[in-house]
């Protein structure tokens, strides 16, 4: 089972270097809050997604999870997005 992790498993510099190669899955907005970004990265041992309000900032990511396959990652990311939408967040077009 995939676990929720809220601290950075690798060095911040290492993950920041990967941001340029990541794929944005979604971005959400809510008045009075910083936007939330969900991004996915591919590693040799699986896929990694992060949700953060400042992906290039100095703090650890709000949420990060590693998944063995892209299907489980997308299902988890979409489930999290759905929960946030129910709490009043709105989708921001990232195109």
Image (spheres, rainbow, N blue to C red):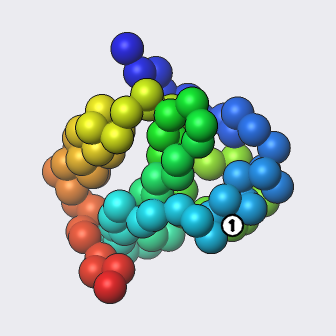
Between 24 and 87, the one lying in front of the other is 24
Whether 16 is drawn above or below 1: the answer is below
Task: Answer with left or right where residue 49 lies relative to residue 80.
Answer: right
In the depicted view, which residue is nearer to us: 82 or 41?
41
Quarter holding residue 36: bottom left
The percent position of residue 5, horizontal first and vertical second, equals: 55, 29
On screen, 50 above or below 18?
A: above
Crowd rating for badge 1 (residues with CA inside 10 Å; few <14, some 14–19, many 20+): some
- Residue drawn at the location 69% of the way across and 67% of the way down: 56
Locate the N terminus and report the quarter of the image it occupies: top left
- In the rendering, at what x and y percent does residue 24 appear? 42, 65
Q: Is residue 71 above or below residue 50?
A: above
Q: Residue at x 57, y 30 (%)?
A: 45
Q: Secondary structure at mark 1?
A: loop
Instruction: Specify the farthest residue to the top.
Output: 1
Q: Is residue 80 visible?
A: no
Q: For the view shown, which residue lies furthest in the bottom direction?
A: 95
Residue 36 or residue 11, whichever sits in front = 11
- Tell me: 30 left or right of 7: left
Residue, disc 1: 56
Residue located 70% across and 33% down the image = 9
Which quadrant does the C terminus fall into? bottom left
Image position of 52 with respect to 72: above or below: below
**Total count of labels:** 1
Q: Is residue 1 visible?
A: yes
Left or right relative to 42: residue 95: left
**Rendering coords of residue 32 (x, y %):** 43, 72
Residue at 74 percent of width and 62 percent of height: 17
């Amino acid at each position: 089972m995939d676990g929720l992790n809220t601290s950075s498993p690798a060095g911040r510099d290492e993950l920041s270097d990967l941001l340029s190669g990541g794929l944005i899955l979604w971005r959400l907005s809510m008045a009075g809050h910083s936007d939330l970004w969900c991004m996915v990265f591919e590693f040799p041992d699986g896929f990694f997604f992060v949700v953060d309000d400042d992906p290039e900032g100095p703090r650890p990511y709000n949420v990060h999870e590693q998944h063995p396959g892209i299907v489980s990652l997308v299902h988890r990311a979409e489930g999290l997005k759905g929960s946030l939408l129910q709490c009043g967040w709105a989708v921001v077009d990232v195109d």
